[in-house]
Amino acid sequence: MNAQFSSEISDSGEFQRQEDAFRKWISSDGSTSYPDAAGRYHLYVSLACPWASRTVIFRKLKGLENAVGIAVVDPIRDERGWAFRDGPGHSIDPINGFKFLSEAYAATDPNFDGRVTVPVLWDKETKKIVNNCEDDICRMFNDAFNAVARNEDVDLFPKEIEAEHAKLCDFLYDNVNNGVYKAGFATRQRPYEISCKKVFEALDELEKRLSKSRYLFDNRIVEADWRLFCTLVRFDVVYHGHFKCNICRIIDYPNLQAYLMDLYQQPGIAETVNFDHIKRHYYMTHEEINPTRIVPVGPALDLMQPHGREKRLS
């Protein structure tokens, strides 16, 4: 297993993801030391990473492009971690001139010795990381930046379904979002099989749920939909082959596939998805899984086809 992940593999061969290290909070009411100031914060992301991509989507949906800057790392990550380089869809760091994202972690905590992850929300004033948890960043983009958001009325965490929504998000994380990683990074047969089975049991359940409503909660798109989308859009491209989650493809599920196309076709979303970054990152970075580093030319996907989900009544 890649040295970056070796500390997250148990003796029994199971992948156990590390906890996020930085969890400070931006507020709109002065309750924290990080105010909701336009231009103060910068988002470091990889377009290959599903966790980071969800924050990119939230930034887009809330209309925060002018309030929160963004920099995209090179999708090819080696033993030095995520790097800032000029290239198609990625660039050098325009804020600090960092060569590697690890420099942001070292500037925030010189003793940090975990795996450097994306996304990172950086504070240009204190020159430290505010938060590197995608769940927190999405929540802050949704709630804390309304005073500077172009689309302040967009609410992806509706209060009326709060408990049920949180429960579904936990289910999605455990069985789908992180489930594909637990299958793909397993180093022994049994943990792989257990994790892979759970992924498809969850997909079967979601297929049934989406046979009854357009989105996960009736006809309104919420955070859980984008959480699921970020895994679905990568599934047939990398998780099916590279992570050996190959019992079925998403295209084999009529409702999940149409739902995926529906979300992909929402305004501004397609531009947040970079299949070149996704494929090159997974197939070229995880050398223990794909030692040749050959990147597949397929699959051929057309997510702009008519999906018919608008006819689905809850």
Image (cartoon, helix red, strand yellow):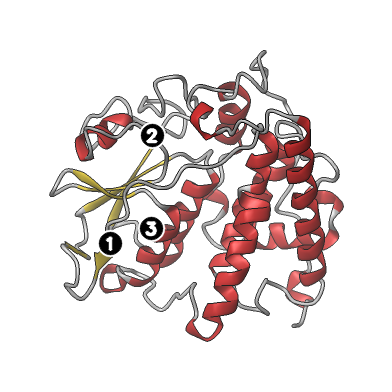
- Report the amino acid beneath label 3: Ile
Marked residue nearer the N-terminal end (2 or 1):
1
Pointer 1 residue? 25
Image marks 3 and 1: residues in contact by CB distance under 8 Å: no
Q: Residue at x 80, y 56 (%)?
A: 201
Element on which disc 3 rests: helix
- Report the amino acid beneath label 2: Gly
Marked residue nearer the N-terminal end (3 or 1):
1
Q: Nearer the viewer, mark 2 or mark 3?
A: 2
**Image quarter in which the N terminus is found:** top right
Image marks 2 and 1: residues in contact by CB distance under 8 Å: no
Q: Residue furthest bottom?
A: 160
Q: Residues within 10 Å of mark 3 (few under 14, many from 20)?
A: many
Q: Residues within 10 Å of mark 1 (few under 14, many from 20)?
A: some
- Report the amino acid beneath label 1: Trp
Task: Judge left or right: residue 19 versus residue 31.
Answer: right
Element on which disc 2 rests: loop
